[in-house]
Amino acid sequence: MRDDIDINYFKHRLELRLNEIESAKKANAPVELDQSRMGRLTRMDAMQQQAMNQAAGRLTEIERQRIRTALDRIKMGEYGYCVQCEEDIAEGRLRADPSVLTCIGCARAAETG
Ligand SMILES: [Zn+2]
């Protein structure tokens, strides 16, 4: 358990974000294409929009899983440690995104392969 960072602060932010994602998901009932209200929107635009929504949905799902993992790690007392090298994750990095699971070094290594 890290005692150099305020775990409760991060826990709070993670829970808020998780609530946000889950309520958005509930509100996001499948949208039917209403031709009369589409105006000048072409079928092509509509399909593009739908593809973008689906991509955003996938990203949100990935974020939701990361948040759940981060919350689990708080319970286990492992929050704030890199899942790969077990080093401390910098506090600034956690503040930017409380759901990050790796340190900057491992994140960079993953990006560059
Ligand atoms: Zn690492």
Image: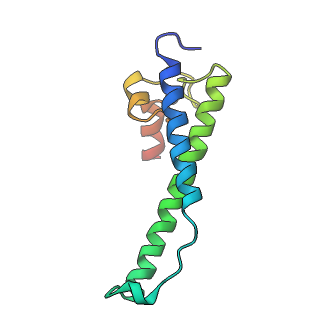
**Colour scheme shown:** rainbow
From the viewer's perspective, tell me whether residue 63 is left or right of residue 44: right
Q: Nearer the viewer, residue 85 or 79?
A: 79
Q: Is residue 101 visible?
A: no
Name the residue at the left extreme. 40
Q: Quadrant of residue 95?
A: top left
Q: How many marks?
A: 0
From the viewer's perspective, tell me whether residue 35 is left or right of residue 30: left
Vertical side of 101 occupied by 50: above or below = below
Tell me residue 35's x, y (percent): 44, 89
Tell me residue 84's x, y (percent): 57, 31
Q: Nearer the viewer, residue 36 or 4?
A: 36
Name the residue at the front extreme. 36
Tell me residue 51's x, y (percent): 47, 73
Vertical side of 36 occupied by 8: above or below = above
Vertical side of 74 occupied by 4: above or below = above
Name the residue at the right extreme. 76
The quadrant in which the N terminus is found is top right
Query: Which residue sits at x=57%, y=39%?
Result: 67
Query: Which residue sits at x=47%, y=67%?
Result: 53
Q: Is residue 93 visible?
A: yes
Query: Which residue sits at x=38%, y=82%?
Result: 45
Tell me residue 87's x, y (percent): 52, 21
Query: Which residue sits at x=48%, y=34%?
Result: 106
Q: Quadrant of residue 58?
A: bottom right
Vertical side of 102 occupied by 54: above or below = below
Q: Nearer the viewer, residue 83 or 61?
A: 61
From the viewer's perspective, tell me whether residue 82 is left or right of residue 69: left
